[in-house]
Amino acid sequence: MTRTPLGALGWTLLTLRFVVELVLFVSPIVIGVRALGSPVGLLVGVALGAVLLAVWGVLLSPRRRVDLPLGARVVVELALMVAAAAGLAATGLVGFAIVFVVVEVVVVGWLWALGMPPGTDVGAGS
């Protein structure tokens, strides 16, 4: 498959996607600290964040170990994002949670329209 160069829009969207994923990975820590206080919340958040990273790495990353069908990957990713957003909203970060989900949906949809569905390894050869 021949791929066209990404250009500024593609790289901007990939950067936003990376930022959204970082927010996803940090959200259990934020939720834990806001809900349980420190240091218990920090420990719980780090533990949940490690589980989240493991799930993402095995099922959703571009170099994942389990290659689920595209539809299943989208459902798993959406479930993780909605769970993180719900936790953020429950701890008082409602506006941030809404922006988080909206940016995720817009960026993933736009990248998909450009031929890079969820789980695409941009660094892989053609």
Image: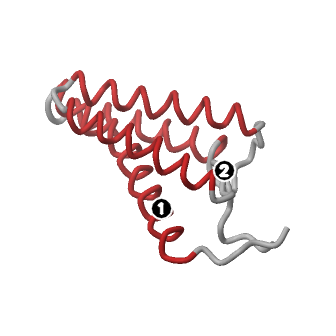
Q: Name the residue at 78% across, 37% down.
A: 69
* Left or right of 121 on screen, residue 99: left
* Left or right of 40 on screen, residue 74: right
Q: Name the residue at 47% across, 55% down.
A: 17
Where is residue 38, by image quadrant? top left
* Left or right of 30 on screen, residue 15: right
Q: Name the residue under label 2.
A: 117
**Residue type at tag 2:** Pro
Residue 40, image x, y percentages: 22, 30
**Residue type at tag 1:** Leu
Residue 26 to residue 15: above or below: above
Depth check: 115 or 119 in front? 115
Q: Name the residue at 73% across, 70% down.
A: 124
Q: What element carries label 2?
A: loop
Residue 70, image x, y percentages: 73, 39
Residue 75, image x, y percentages: 61, 29
Quadrant assignment for the C terminus: bottom right
Residue 106, image x, y percentages: 46, 46
Which of marks 2 and 1 precedes in the sequence? 1
Q: Callout 2 environment at 10 Å: few (<14), some (14 to 19), or many (20+)?
A: some
Check the image and name the residue furthest to the right. 1
Depth check: 23 or 1 in front? 1
Do callouts 1 and 2 mark residues in contact (Cβ within 8 Å)?
A: no
Q: Is mark 1 on a helix, strand or loop?
A: helix
The numbered disc on residue 101 is none
Q: Name the residue under label 1.
A: 13
Depth check: 16 or 24 in front? 16
Depth check: 95 or 115 in front? 115
